[in-house]
Image (cartoon, helix red, strand yellow):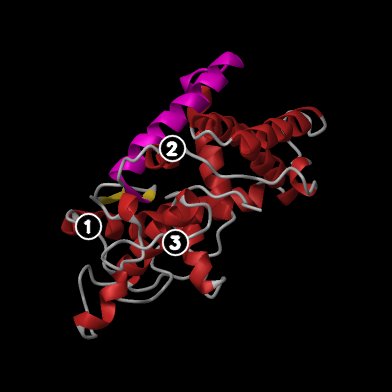
Amino acid sequence: MIRRFRPAAFALLLFALVLSGCATVGGPKPLPPPGAQTVEPDRLEFLEAYDPLEPMNRHIYRFNILADRYVMAPVVRVYEWTIPEYARNRVSDFFSNLGDLPVLANCILQGKADRAVTVVGRLLVNTTAGVGGLWDIASKMDDLPKYTEDFGQTLAVYGLGPGPYLMIPILGPSTFRDVGGRFVDGATRNSVIGLLGGDAATDLALSVVDGLQLRASMPIGYGGLDSAFEYEILRTLYLDIRNLLIHDGEFVESKAGGRRGASESGN
C-alpha cells in the first residue's frame, strides 16, 4: 500500500526516513557549512547527482534551514498549542481527500485504470461516509489503498527526464520536471476549489493550513542531521524516492550502472 507522500514538501519526510525521529524541531543547532567535506571524495560517489545549479541550491538550502528554524517551527508550535489534535487530524484527512483529485487525473493520464477505479472509490467513500473528507474512512479498508500519483510522475511516464536538481525556497527539493508537475497539480486543485465556490484567498488560506499541518506531522526539520553532508543526503533521498514512485517501488539501473534509470539520469 502506498501511503500519502508529497514530493519536496519541506523535505521533512525524507529526513524522517533516515532518522526516525532522532532529532526534533527544538533548540537551535549550528548551521552546516555550505560546502564543507571531511572525507575523501571517492567515498561520496553514492551521493552524486545531476546538480549543475549546486552553488545556488546550497544558498537556498541554507536559507531554508533558517526559515524552518526561526519561522516555521515556532509557528507550528503555536498551531499545535491552539488547535486540538482531533481538529488537526480532520484538517489532514480533508486535504488528503482533496489531494486524491489530481491523483485520479494522473492515474488516468498514465493509463493506470485499476488505480483510477480505486481512487474513485476512495473519493466516494471519504466524501460521503467521511463527511466531505473530514474522516479518512477509505484508508481503513484493505481494497482502497492510498496512492501517490502527480503530474511530475506522469511526465516521467511519457519519457520526460527530470532535468537538473533544484532546491526551492521553503518548499524544498525538486527537479525542473517536478516543478512543472507541481504547477499543474496546483492548478487542478485551484479549479476544484473554484468549482466549490472558493477564490484565490480561500486557496491561499487552505494552502497555509495544509503546510502547517504537514510540518506539524514531521519529527525534524532542516539541519536535523547535524552533518556536513546533509545537503547531499537530502538530494539523494529525494531523487531515489521519486525513482521509487515513478517505477512503482523498483529502482531502475542505468546503463552506466547508476541507481537511477535512463529517464531519471538527469538528461
Amino acid of disc 3: Phe
Of residues 220 and 28, the one drawn nearer to the viewer in this rendering: 220
Mark 2 crowdedness (10 Å alpha carbons): few <14, some 14-19, many ≥20: many
Residue at the location (82% across, 32% down)? 129
Of residues 47 and 111, the one drawn nearer to the viewer in this rendering: 111
Label 1, secondary structure: give it. Answer: loop
Judge from the rendering whether residue 70 lies leftward or rightward of residue 40; answer left or right: right
Q: Position of residue 227 (x, y in %)?
A: 35, 76
Q: Quadrant of residue 253?
A: bottom left
Residue at the location (30% across, 58% down)? 61
Q: Which residues are magenta?
A: 173-201
Magenta stretch: helix, strand or loop mostly: helix
**Residue identifier under label 3:** 251
Amino acid of disc 2: Thr
Amino acid of disc 1: Asp
47 inside magenta stretch: no
Of residues 234 and 32, the one drawn nearer to the viewer in this rendering: 234
Q: Nearer the viewer, mark 3 or mark 1?
A: 3
**Residue identifier under label 2:** 154
Judge from the rendering whether residue 69 lies leftward or rightward of residue 142; answer left or right: left
